[in-house]
Image (cartoon, grey):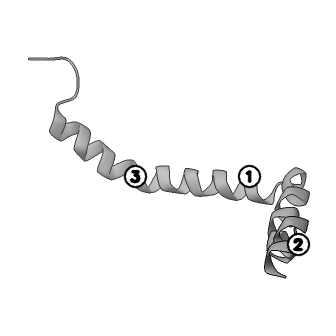
Amino acid sequence: MSDGFSLAELAHLARQIWPLWLMLIFLGIAFYAFRPKNRRHFEECANIPFTTDGEESRRHD
């Protein structure tokens, strides 16, 4: 017999803690997205569709 987890025990443990992992991942993403330090970066990214590139405008004329 081994001292570690069997595959069935490991699967049972994983089924029990997956909501915790998902919540931690969600909170990490939300923390990253709403940090004041990232505000300017996300505002610049949000405005990308409204900016014109000189090369693009010449191609459409």
Label tally: 3
Task: Give neighbour class at mark 2: few <14, some 14-19, many 20+ (Cα, 10 Å).
Answer: few
Picture disc at residue 5: none
Q: In whole angstroms, how far apart are the C-alphas of marks 1 and 2?
A: 28 Å
N-term-proximal mark, 3 vs 2: 3
Identify the mark at residue 18; answer none if there is no mark. 3
Percent across and percent down for residue 31 are 73, 54
Residue occupied by mark 1: 32
Mark 1 against mark 2, which lies toward the viewer?
2
Disc 3 versus disc 2: distance between alpha carbons?
Answer: 44 Å
Q: Does 41 sit above or below residue 8? A: below
The residue where tag 2 is placed is 52
User: Residue 28 placed where, x, y %?
Assistant: 65, 50
Three-letter amino acid code at the position of disc 2 = Thr
Q: Which quadrant would the C terminus be assigned to in this image? A: bottom right
| Drawn side of residue 19 relative to residue 41, left or right | left
Q: Residue at x 75, y 58 (%)?
A: 33
The amino acid at mark 1 is Tyr
Of marks 3 and 2, the one in the foreground: 2
Nearer to us in this view, 43 or 34 = 43
